[in-house]
Amino acid sequence: VKPGCRVSYQSHERRSEHWVVVRGTATIVLDDKTYTLEEGMSTDVPTGTKHRIGNTTTSDLVFIEVQRGDYFGE
């Protein structure tokens, strides 16, 4: 995620996600609550949770997203 950018605020009804920050600092929103994740930290995004990940720093953010569920076309 480039500096100053973020992904859309969304939720998924048939899958959950797990995010791991590989490089940089992530600003995440889960159901309207904002958190910060540093390198090496991770979080789960349960099914149905509104979520977003963004980068408010001046360096690139690299993260891994693992999706779990029975449908991934959302």
Image: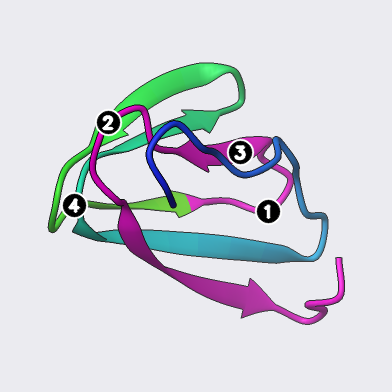
User: Is residue 2 magenta-colored?
Assistant: no
Which segment did they paint magenta?
45-74
Q: Which residue is mark 1?
A: 47
Cα–Cα span, label 4 and label 3: 17 Å
- Image quarter for residue 26? top left
Vertical position of residue 64 compared to residue 25: above or below: below
**Upstream in sequence: badge 4 or badge 2:** 4
Q: Which residue is mark 3?
A: 51
Q: Residues within 10 Å of mark 4 (few under 14, many from 20)?
A: some
Label drawn at residue 39: none
Cα–Cα span, label 1 and label 3: 10 Å
**Upstream in sequence: badge 4 or badge 3:** 4
Q: What kind of element bears circle 2?
A: loop
The colour mode here is rainbow
**Upstream in sequence: badge 1 or badge 4:** 4
Could you say where residue 7 lies in the image, as x and y percent from the top left? 62, 44
**Upstream in sequence: badge 2 or badge 1:** 1
Cα–Cα span, label 2 and label 1: 28 Å
Left or right relative to 55: residue 30: right
The amino acid type found where label 2 is placed reads Thr
Q: Are the residues tagged 1 and 3 within 8 Å (C-beta)?
A: no
